[in-house]
Image (tube, rainbow, N blue to C red):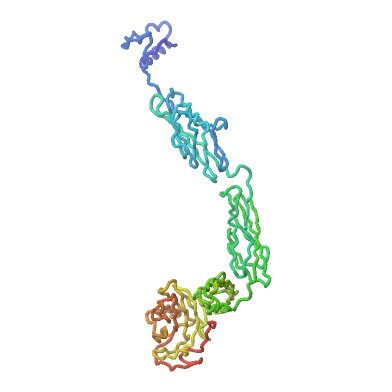
């Protein structure tokens, strides 16, 4: 039943209830059941219509979003009706009002044209807001552009939130929120293999360290898919030990070669994150630099000479270019010294380059090599340099605060001074020169003994200026007396030249205080300590 006009809400309910009741009664009883008329306190509106005092209820906006999206790396994604992936907002009761749409992405940036008349805020950022009529907002959304981060791939979440700003009715502003997953793909097409780059061919001198550099290997699919596995293998030439063969940069020591030199080849294999592979080869030509100038046992003192240049040179510059590292007493001297380092049973070759300048403005450079062999001494820690101070004794030495540049045994009988001379210098005297990090610095020298020092033995030193002296508290034995540590300072009492020149020279050894022994010359037996053997080169 359709009423010709509308009653207020409360009265509509009462009339509706009465009508239902009447319809449920038999026809003869309906008239008796009809209630008396109720006076209407509200006069009818003009033109015969009644006022509608109902309160409208606001309906929320509705987003329409596409399913998951895919775009290639570095390629923007356009949301539009033409592409079939438009973002759309609608509101059935906006009634001409404005709404606001906010769009965010977890990575990358968003942008719209901004020419619809709607208010666009933060255009070109990772979140933008569009405020305006439904038509203007949808015009901006049709063509929304998403730009992924440069050279990046992965998953991105786009979130769209619409707000009707309370248009219209109760209970006020309502929203709708939806999201779209975007995949930024690595490539547009199928995976491409990496490009292996083993670097240019090389020419080096024998015994020098060689670096094989494959770090310029790349992948057409972008840096995020660059090679993840490297493998260097030798394919030709004398065998060498490759260090870092499973890394982009490998290294080896150029082997000893004949007079005509030799050629080595290495193959680099690279594999990318999708297991595609490529290879590249590099050749290394090794030149012969001549025979080593000598062979010396570890722990001995070696002097480098510059034959033929002494009268012409005004400037020397020595530089070690391969082999176990050593310290030179003076890199700018014509005849610097160093102590042969620790080597394994196979020995090692040290290579030095000498550059000179002459008084007439000329100059040149030359390369020298020195072979170091294992001295065969055992029973000491592996990181301790071993040597033979006298004919029948063995010792070890370690330095903290500097590096050895000279080490040799000395027969005490060569020293004529008898005042305070110790007895029983069972190891003879050890001459050690330590190059410190800077002039005036101190250092600690630890001697390792093959047999424990007897009780009553102390550590004695000698300088030309002060004669014999006991180190006292500056020499400390360990509990089992197989090790003693000396504290020495440049320019101090133990420094033989007493100069501040960056080198501390110490002449010392274990002995026992007592009645001075008469001086003697030559080797032999007795309390002064055995035969003299100078292992330094002349």
User: Where is residue 428 drawn, in percent x and y?
Assistant: 47, 86
Q: Is residue 487 visible?
A: no
Residue 247, quarter of the rendered image: bottom right
**In what quadrant of the picture does the C terminus appear?**
bottom right
Tell me if 18 is positioned left or right of 317 in this view. left
Tell me if 515 is positioned left or right of 385 in this view. left
Count of marks, rendered view: 0
| Foreground pick, 230 / 280 | 280
| Residue at x-position 40% and y-position 78% | 491
Tell me if 425 is positioned left or right of 83 in this view. left
Farthest left residue in view? 41
Q: Is residue 389 visible?
A: yes
**In what quadrant of the picture does the N terminus appear?**
top left
Farthest front residue in view? 360
| Residue at x-position 44% and y-position 91% | 416
| Residue at x-position 48% and y-position 32% | 114
User: Where is residue 177 drawn, in percent x and y?
Assistant: 46, 33
Residue 476, quarter of the rendered image: bottom left
User: Where is residue 18 drawn, in percent x and y?
Assistant: 38, 12
**Eyeballing the image, is 14 above or below 443?**
above
**Eyeballing the image, is 96 above or below 536?**
above
**Eyeballing the image, is 274 above or below 48?**
below
User: Where is residue 332 drawn, in percent x and y?
Assistant: 50, 74
């Amino acid at each position: 039943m359709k009423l010709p006009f509308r009653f207020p809400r409360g009265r509509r309910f009462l009339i509706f209830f009465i009508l239902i009741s009447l319809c449920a009664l038999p026809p003869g009883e309906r008239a008796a059941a009809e209630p008396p008329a109720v006076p209407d306190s509200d006069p009818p509106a003009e033109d015969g219509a009644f006022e509608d005092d109902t309160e409208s209820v606001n309906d929320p906006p509705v987003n329409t979003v596409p399913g998951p999206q895919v775009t290639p790396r570095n390629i923007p994604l356009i949301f539009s009706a033409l592409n079939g992936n438009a973002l759309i907002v609608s509101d059935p009761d906006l009634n001409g009002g404005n709404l606001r749409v906010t769009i965010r992405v977890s990575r990358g940036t968003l942008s719209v044209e901004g020419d619809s008349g709607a208010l666009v805020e933060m255009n070109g950022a990772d979140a933008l807001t569009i405020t305006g009529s439904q038509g203007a907002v949808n015009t901006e959304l049709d063509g929304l552009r998403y730009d992924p981060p440069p050279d990046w791939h992965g998953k991105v979440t786009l979130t769209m939130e619409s707000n009707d700003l309370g248009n219209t009715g109760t209970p006020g502003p309502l929203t709708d929120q939806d999201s779209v997953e975007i995949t930024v793909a690595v490539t547009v097409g199928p995976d491409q293999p990496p490009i292996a780059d083993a670097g240019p061919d090389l020419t080096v001198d024998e015994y020098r360290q060689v670096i094989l550099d494959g770090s310029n290997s790349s992948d057409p699919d972008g840096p995020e898919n660059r090679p993840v596995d490297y493998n260097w293998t030798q394919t030709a030439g004398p065998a060498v030990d490759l260090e870092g063969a499973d890394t982009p940069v490998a290294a080896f020591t150029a082997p000893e070669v004949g007079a005509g030199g030799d050629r080595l080849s290495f193959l680099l294999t690279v594999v990318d994150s999708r297991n595609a592979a490529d290879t590249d080869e590099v050749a290394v030509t090794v030149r012969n630099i001549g025979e080593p100038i000598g062979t010396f046992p570890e722990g001995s003192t070696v002097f480098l000479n510059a034959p033929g240049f002494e009268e012409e040179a005004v400037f020397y510059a020595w530089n070690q270019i391969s082999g176990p590292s050593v310290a030179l007493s003076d890199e700018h001297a014509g005849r610097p010294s160093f102590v042969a380092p620790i080597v394994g049973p196979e020995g090692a070759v040290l290579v030095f380059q000498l550059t000179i300048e002459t008084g007439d403005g000329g100059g040149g450079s030359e390369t020298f090599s020195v072979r170091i062999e294992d001295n065969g001494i055992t029973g000491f820690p592996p990181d301790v340099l071993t040597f033979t101070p006298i004919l029948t004794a063995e010792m070890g030495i370690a330095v903290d605060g500097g590096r050895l540049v000279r080490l040799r045994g000395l027969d005490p009988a060569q020293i004529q001074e008898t005042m305070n001379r110790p007895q029983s210098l069972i190891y003879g005297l050890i001459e050690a020169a330590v190059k410190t990090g800077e002039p005036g610095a101190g250092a600690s020298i630890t001697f390792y003994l093959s047999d424990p020092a007897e009780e009553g033995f102390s550590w004695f030193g000698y300088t030309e200026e002060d004669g014999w002296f006991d180190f006292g508290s500056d020499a400390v034995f360990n509990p089992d007396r197989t090790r003693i540590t000396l504290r020495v300072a440049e320019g101090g009492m133990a420094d033989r030249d007493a100069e501040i020149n960056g080198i501390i020279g110490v002449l010392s050894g274990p002995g026992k205080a007592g009645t001075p022994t008469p001086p003697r010359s030559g080797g032999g037996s007795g309390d002064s300590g055995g035969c003299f053997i100078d292992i330094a080169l002349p």
